[in-house]
Amino acid sequence: MGGNSPCASCKLLRRRCAKGCIFAPYFPPDDPHRFAIVHKVFGASNISKMLQELPVHQRADAVNSLVYEANARVRDPVYGCVGAISYLQNQVAQLQMQLAVAQAEILCIQVQQEPMAMPSPVVPMDGSDDKSFLLHNNLPQYFNLASNSSNVTHESLKRESFFGHDMVS
């Protein structure tokens, strides 16, 4: 700024804001919290070094990234942004599992509701092939397995989340 009002960094550091202050374009005086949080996490000299090493057209993006990371570090001092990303990835995994369970349940319901088109049993007139007659008449009992296996499918898809709760109830 260099004139009437010092930038937020110079104001916080209690120094005179020079005309070519590297912080002035990115930390205006009306938003002192923005610099305060970045200064608390990274330090003014480190921020100054980073900004000086970057081309002018990349500095605004770098400052926005520093502010975002500083806010994340204040909320989660150990993991910062990585903690937020990890949490969101876990949520995506849980939702994908729930979607897979729902799709499996839909498939089971569709299989149960489809009418079974069985060929009508042919009774041999000459008595030559009694085994095929018995085979055709006893097959329908094996096609009803889908109704018995829906609970097994539901239970096999149950997984525990990272937070100790079942993902599927």
Image (cartoon, grey):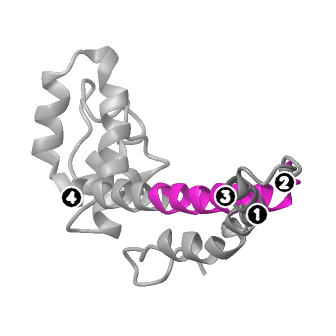
- What's the magenta region? 92-117
The disc label shown at residue 131, or none = 3
Amino acid under disc 4: Val
Q: Determine the secondary structure under disc 4.
A: helix
Q: Determine the secondary structure under disc 3.
A: helix
Q: Are marks 3 and 2 in contact (CB under 8 Å)?
A: no
Q: Are marks 2 and 1 in contact (CB under 8 Å)?
A: yes
Q: Are marks 3 and 1 in contact (CB under 8 Å)?
A: no
Residue 166, image x, y percentages: 50, 81
Q: What is the distance, in whole Å, between disc 2 and disc 1 at their CAs?
A: 8 Å
Q: Name which of mark 3 and mark 2 comes first in the sequence.
A: 2
The secondary structure making up most of the magenta span is helix
From the viewer's perspective, tell me whether residue 116 is left or right of residue 42: right
**Is 158 in front, or is 91?**
158
Looking at the rendered image, the disc whose residue lies closer to the viewer, 4 or 2, is 2
Amino acid under disc 1: Pro
Dot 1, crowdedness within 10 Å: few (<14), some or many (≥20)? Answer: few
Dot 3, crowdedness within 10 Å: few (<14), some or many (≥20)? Answer: few
Task: Tell me where residue 32 sits by quadrant.
Answer: bottom left
**Is 8 in front, or is 124?**
124
Residue drawn at x 67%, y 65% is 142
Amino acid under disc 3: Lys
Looking at the rendered image, the disc whose residue lies closer to the viewer, 3 or 1, is 3
Residue 64, image x, y percentages: 38, 38
Residue 134, image x, y percentages: 72, 63
Q: Name which of mark 4 and mark 2 comes first in the sequence.
A: 4
Q: What is the distance, in whole Å, between disc 3 and disc 1 at their CAs?
A: 16 Å
Q: Which residue is mark 1?
A: 140
Q: Which residue is mark 4?
A: 41
Q: What is the distance, in whole Å, between disc 4 and disc 2 at their CAs?
A: 68 Å
